[in-house]
Image (cartoon, rainbow, N blue to C red):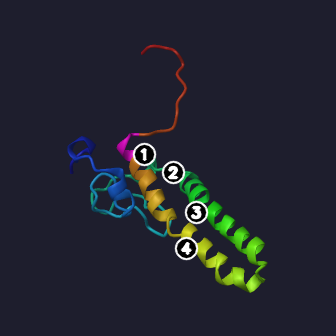
Amino acid sequence: MLNDDEWPPLRPVGVGIRGRCPRCGQGHLFSGFLKIADKCDYCDLDFSFADPADGPAFFVICFACIPSLIMGLWIELAYQAPYWVHLLTTLPFLLLTCIPPLRPLKGWLVASQYYFKAAEGKLDDGLEK
């Protein structure tokens, strides 16, 4: 099996949004909707390095939830709409703009972590070795 240096570098956006392995681009990154697999089923890359934390949720909140909330408030203030109107307009818009982007964003962040070799910060004890 090839080591990391022998695989061609793949663009994080390309493999991430498709939910593919950031090293080979063939295997699956996810084992569920948002659950990251333990390893690639094609090249056996261990995905234990992957820790997107709340990154995908942050982006979705900023770019989808806030506009959805503004739309709902606008409908309420402009038309004084009853609850059923919000149930038929605001709720589906909120769900369609918040749930589908989570998986591609999470894949992109994990692929970016691999591509840029991002890791948890470590303290430097100041000793030369």
Q: Amino acid at mark 4?
A: Leu
Q: Point out the stretch of residues depicted in magenta.
A: 113-117
The residue wearing badge 3 is 64
Instruction: Please tell me whether mark 1 or mark 4 is closer to you in this view.
Output: 4
Query: Does the CB distance between marks 2 and 1 fall below 8 Å?
Result: yes
Camera-side residue: 54 or 76?
76
Q: Is residue 21 visible?
A: no
Taking the spot 51% from the left edge, 63% from the top edge, the residue there is 102
Location of residue 117 (image quadrant): top left
Marker disc for residue 52: 2
Mark 1: few, some, or many residues within 10 Å (few <14, many ≥20)?
some
Disc 1 from disc 4: Cα separation: 27 Å
Q: Which residue is mark 4?
A: 96
Residue assigned mark 1:
113
Q: Position of residue 63 (x, y in %)?
A: 57, 58
Q: Is residue 108 left or right of residue 125?
A: left
Q: Is residue 42 left or right of residue 101?
A: left
- Which residue appears at 42% of the width and 15% of the height? 129
